[in-house]
Image: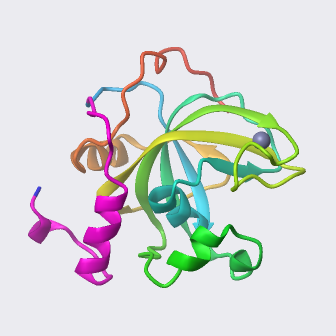
């Protein structure tokens, strides 16, 4: 995949820089996963996961699912986000792609817990903290409708996503993952 094939509605230079910043430091293995879920997140939080290392998704409900997850930017924007977001989000707010209604990254839910919010700068007290790891930005967003909770991607969406540089994080634990 060359840079010229990348689709982006934002300035190419900005996107290139963000992608470079989000580039992995460890090699990636493309794997076929039987377990895969989608997680719809409002902007700018979805971009925070994709580009800024947001490693906790704050939810009112617990999840028992662990395994790969598509980070889907919803159609809604949390306009009050910057009032309580870490400085990293405010600093980058003007540069983030802000794509709506598309899968923008692939990550992995490694667990969920409740704590006082000390586990991550992105954690909010009083919420369940869904831990995210190994997040990879897709080479181009895949437009699709989202849903509430953890949703199951269609085979067509799986095919599209895995074609985006195959950014599915490898895991020996992807088998036997349980549902939400
Ligand atoms: Zn926590």
User: Which one is in front, 171 or 39?
Assistant: 171
Q: Is residue 9 above or below residue 1?
A: below
Residue 147 placement (x, y as % from top left):
60, 56
User: Which one is in front, 56 or 26?
Assistant: 26
Q: Is residue 19 one of those drawn in magenta?
A: yes
Residue 31 placement (x, y as % from top left):
29, 27
Confirm whether residue 140 shows in the render: no
Q: Is residue 169 one of those drawn in magenta?
A: no
At 36% from the left edge and 40% from the top edge, which residue is drawn? 155
Taking the image as four quarters, which one is ligand 1 found in? top right
Confirm whether residue 98 shows in the render: yes
User: Which one is in front, 74 or 17?
Assistant: 17
Residue 144 placement (x, y as % from top left):
43, 61
Horizontal relation, residue 92 to residue 167: left or right: right
At 82% from the left edge and 48% from the top edge, which residue is drawn? 117
Q: Is residue 85 above or below residue 153?
A: below
Horizontal relation, residue 73 to residue 27: left or right: right
Q: Is residue 126 above or below residue 33?
A: below
At 23% from the left edge and 79% from the top edge, which residue is drawn? 12
Quarter holding the C terminus? top right
At 42% from the left edge and 22% from the top edge, which residue is drawn? 171
Residue 115 placement (x, y as % from top left):
85, 40
Horizontal relation, residue 106 to residue 151: left or right: left
Color scheme of the displayed model = rainbow
- Range of magenta residues: 2-29
Quarter holding the N terminus? bottom left
Q: Is residue 102 above or below residue 67?
A: below
């Amino acid at each position: 995949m060359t840079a010229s094939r990348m689709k982006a509605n934002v300035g190419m230079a900005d996107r290139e820089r963000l992608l470079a910043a989000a580039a992995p430091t460890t090699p990636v293995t493309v794997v076929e996963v039987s377990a895969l879920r989608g997680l719809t997140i409002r902007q700018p939080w979805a971009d925070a996961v994709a580009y800024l290392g947001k490693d906790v998704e704050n939810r009112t409900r617990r999840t028992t699912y662990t395994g790969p997850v598509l980070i889907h930017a919803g159609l809604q924007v949390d306009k009050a986000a910057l009032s309580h977001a870490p400085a990293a989000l405010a600093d980058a707010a003007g540069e983030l792609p802000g794509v709506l209604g598309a899968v923008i990254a692939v990550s992995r839910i490694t667990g969920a817990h409740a704590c006082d919010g000390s586990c991550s700068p992105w954690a909010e007290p009083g919420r369940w903290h869904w831990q995210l790891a190994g997040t990879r930005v897709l080479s181009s967003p895949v437009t699709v409708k989202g849903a509430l909770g953890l949703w199951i991607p269609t085979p067509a969406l799986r095919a599209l996503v895995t074609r985006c540089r195959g950014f599915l994080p490898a895991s020996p634990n992807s088998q036997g993952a349980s549902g939400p």
